[in-house]
Amino acid sequence: MTPAPGPEKKPSPAIAPPDIRRLRARFVAISWRDLAVSFGPALIFCVAAIWLAVWLIQPAPPTTISISAGPKGSSFWNAADRYAKILARNGITLNVLPSEGSLQNVQRLADPKQAVDLALVQGGVSDGVDTGGLVSLGSMFYAPISVLYRGKEKHKLSDFRDARIAIGREGSGSRALALALLKANGIEPGGSARLISFDGDDAAQALVDGKIDVAMLSGDSATGPTMRKLIRTPGIRQLDFAQADAYTRRFLYLQELVLPAGVFDLGKNLPSHPIHLISPTVELVARDTLHPALSDLLIEAAREVHGKAGLLQGAGQFPSAKVHEFPLSDDATRYYASGKSFFYRHLPFWLASLLDRALLILLPMIVILIPAFRLVPSLYSWRVKSRIYRWYGSLIEIERVAMVDPTEEEKAGLIARLDHIEEAVNRMKMPLAYADQFYVLREHIVFVRRRLTGAQ
């Protein structure tokens, strides 16, 4: 039996989906474009600081330098040769160039055409030489002037006005100093005294043979064996400078020294009494372009060579920061005040030099990067938020117009503008860390739309 048909069911009308616009926002972990724009200025400043540091700092120290010393076998030559051996331990080659003496040394150093970086220079020889651009690494040792003579005892150079005087070879510091001292006593070339270019052993032998009356020996010419030979020769005396203090006042590069009695022969008590001498110091002079690392290394070598006690100096007296004719270099001043830096005390020279220069490059980077790293997050956050905040101005403008009873045509225009804003916001690229602010903006868009719909 067919059941009676019931009341016909009408299909329920379909529920219209709400007007929800499609969300097309692209969420990312980080916005690389914003990060690049934020970090860009700091990166530019950092690169500029590195370039400036590289431009200003010294390059790596050279591995080969040259020193003008003196005649081969002289004390100047021997000292420079010992410097070379010490520097060789640290991979630095020091070429030792022979010369006539201090005068030629300082002339070479003052001439930019000469391939010379250093020179040993005795005080009192730089008159007439342009010493601009030359600096001292310190005083290295004494070079006392010894005056040996025949005849009755004398105490002043002026007593030799009519004598035959050996003053040293051309170009030597001994000759330059002898001429300066004799001139101060009224004895000059062409006068009544006869000035002869004998030096060292030649001068000593000429004095023994009676060919000259006076021998002025200094530095290399006044070696220990030569001095002992002359002191032991009957009839030869050594001048005791009675006016030593006056000389040190007149010639500021001179110092007064005392040769103790018996220093040459204790048994025979030679000399028989203390002898007052006058002496310049020998300075290690360099061009002011010398690499700072080499300056420290050279002073260390000089300390090893000249730091021991001797007849006229105490242990540790040399090298000394006390200089006379040349200004002490800034690097030498620092060294004498505080010694070697940390790197050079504990590391090999090449590694210390590398780290020292690397530190000079890293410091400006650190100075720039620390403030930059603090500023970059703020710049990055501001750029991301600015893309959100710039739509709030348009929303406020639309809401204000909706509140003053706009016409239907104006409402349609406002809704179109709102649609455009919503579409643009939904297409934004937004880091996940700022998703909350993104959704707050979308809620505000919905709020303004409701105001418009309510007003409509």
Image (cartoon, grey):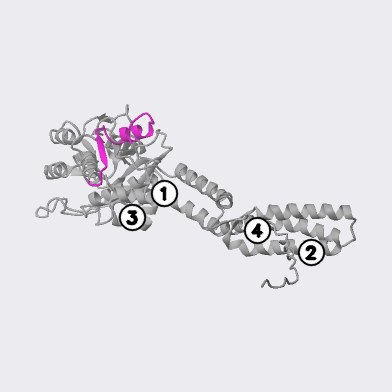
Q: Secondary structure at mark 3?
A: helix
Q: CA distance from mark 3 to mark 1?
A: 19 Å
The amino acid beneath tag 2 is Arg
Q: List x then y, in percent, for residue 155.
A: 27, 45
Q: Mark 3 or mark 1: which comes first in sequence?
A: 1
Q: Residue furthest front?
A: 1
What residue would you read off at disc 1?
330
Which of pointers 2 and 1 indicates the residue nearer the eye? 2
Residue occupying the point 18% across, 37% down: 73
Residue picked out by circle 4:
385
Q: Which mark is residue 216?
A: none
Q: Nearer the viewer, mark 4 or mark 1?
A: 4
Looking at numbered disc 3 in the image, what kind of residue is underneath it?
Phe
Horizontally, residue 117 falls left or right of residue 234, namely: right
| Within-10-Å neighbours for mark 3: few <14, some 14–19, many 20+ | some
Find disc 3 in the rendering and name its residue. Answer: 343
- Residues in magenta? 89-116
- The mark nearer the N terminus, 2 or 3, is 3
Mark 4 to mark 2 CA distance (whole Å): 25 Å
